[in-house]
Image (tube, rainbow, N blue to C red):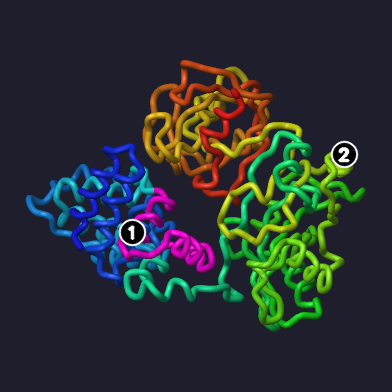
Amino acid sequence: MLLADVARTLETVSQTRARSAKTAALADLLRRTDPADASALVGMLIGRVRQGRIGVGWRTVVDLRSQIAPSKEPGLSVREVDDALEQIAHTPSGAGSAGVRRDLIGSLFAHADSAESDLLARILTGEVRTGALEGIVIDALAAATDTPATVVRRAVMLSGDLGLTAELALREPAALADVGLRVGVPVQPMLASTSSSVEDAISTAGESSVEHKLDGARIQVHRDGDDVLVVTRSLADVTARVPEIVERVRALPIRSAIFDGETLLLDDDGAPRPFQDTMSRFGRHGVPDSVLRPWFFDVLHLDGTDLIDEPLRVRRGALADVAAQHLIASTVTDDPAAAQRVLDEALASGQEGVMVKSLDAPYAAGRRGKAWLKVKPVHTYDLVVLGAEWGSGRRTGWLSNLHLGARDPEGVAGEPGGFVMVGKTFKGLTDELLRWQTETFPAYETRRTTHAVFLRPEIVVEIAIDGVQRSSRYPGGVALRFARVKGYRPDKSPAEADTINSLQAQLR
């Protein structure tokens, strides 16, 4: 398939706000795709190539494109682009490596016509934002293969890879129904929605497990014999960095399991240390100078039996049988007053709040529904950084005031599939964070002015607010009230940022 075909389809997708039209256009493209190209194509559609980061900066791409005139005819195939990206990603670092990467990219641009050149530049810089988000691609794949969307979605969640699922669907659609849990293959985690109070949460979920919401890092732990795999919320492998967790899981009286849970550092009094301390610990190799402890709240597989479709009450029972010492404490209740007491205890111990989980719900991998509800007294949202302004006074020379964006999945604010600005803040930024921003943000730069640097929407930051207010200043119609930075969330992807809809709901 020519890259020009992909460019034409994405142009159609970007020009419509109707989800059905986007789905139809992408389904037509997928029907014409060779299964061998499916994984590469999906990566290009969602703006996340399968090779991950390939070591090529935005400036290099822009400079090369400006120096090479487009071809008069389309000349690139999806497979050729993917092969080149593979070579670039595996080019050894060292003397001459930058030149090799430049030559490979230059060759691509030399064979690309104008439309292909534009799309290629956006693929290389992560700028493919046309509303072709994963959910729409899943719907399109279902339509292209005449498969129920629920079957495709489940296969994606259990395989953890939309590209590989697309390849399987195009080769043998019936095989999607056979995709199941595999120990050692990370699963997209079940997600929680937000509830304004424990009373509302209990009313929605019914009899529930009410648990402390730890201010830690989400982990998923797989064990197969003596082999242990630990991955983060984004499914990044951190096994080598957490030997203490590996040791604890190996000590459990089991043969195989998939656990879901959290980990965090505690101070000498047993209170949770700041989230950034936990994340910093993930970034260090070698002998740890601080010890992470796992707390598990779910088990998806145990000793040859898949539990993912069992209700939570069954899963919690199985977890208590094999890992009671690592089990997050739970109060089972349908009484709002009892749930409120758990919330009060959690806050008093320094935790974020509580999770209210329906005891009758299965584990919905990758989904954010009403079966799990989080209750926190302070409104916090995961937003993306769209830009930063240069500071003044004591902050002169540092990138300071952040431009914050919420995810806009349905184009309700006029930029389909993108991010819409909802406010600015410089509050909560320590000198350490200011220094980090100034050093880090240029790597994500798309353009700059005298006063600000604008970024690709890839950096997620947790923002605490007192609420929102109506605003005609921003396209989403809302602005943040008293926003302040809680911390950056390297464990979360932009696709997990909170939506403009969730902010607008606070106005009601």
Q: Position of residue 246 (x, y in %)?
A: 73, 71
Residue 499 is marked as: none
Residue 349, image quadrant: top right
Q: Amino acid at mark 1?
A: Ala
Q: Nearer the viewer, residue 365 or 213?
A: 365
Q: Earlier in the sequence, mark 1 or mark 2?
A: 1
Q: Are marks 1 and 2 in contact (CB under 8 Å)?
A: no
C-alpha separation, residue under disc 1 versus residue under disc 2: 47 Å
For label 1, count other residues whose C-alpha is less than 10 Å away and answer few (under 14), some (14-19) or many (20+).
some
Image label count: 2
Name the magenta segment's main secondary structure: helix
Which residue corresponds to the image point at 33% horizontal and 46% vertical from the top-left?
Answer: 20
Residues in magenta?
133-162
Name the residue that disc number 2 marks.
337
Q: Is residue 91 visible?
A: no
Q: Dot 2: what SS?
A: helix
Q: Dot 1: what SS?
A: helix
Q: Position of residue 455 (x, y in %)?
A: 44, 37
Q: Position of residue 139 (x, y in %)?
A: 39, 55
Above or below — where is 204 with respect to 76? Answer: above
Which residue corresponds to the image point at 32% horizontal and 74% vertical from the top-left?
Answer: 171
Above or below — where is 454 with respect to 254? Answer: above
Name the residue that disc number 1 marks.
143
Q: Is residue 325 visible?
A: yes
Q: Amino acid at mark 2?
A: Ala
Q: Is residue 383 magenta?
A: no
Side of 221 relative to 473 (left or right) = right
Side of 418 relative to 400 (left or right) = left
Q: Nearer the viewer, residue 287 or 246?
A: 246
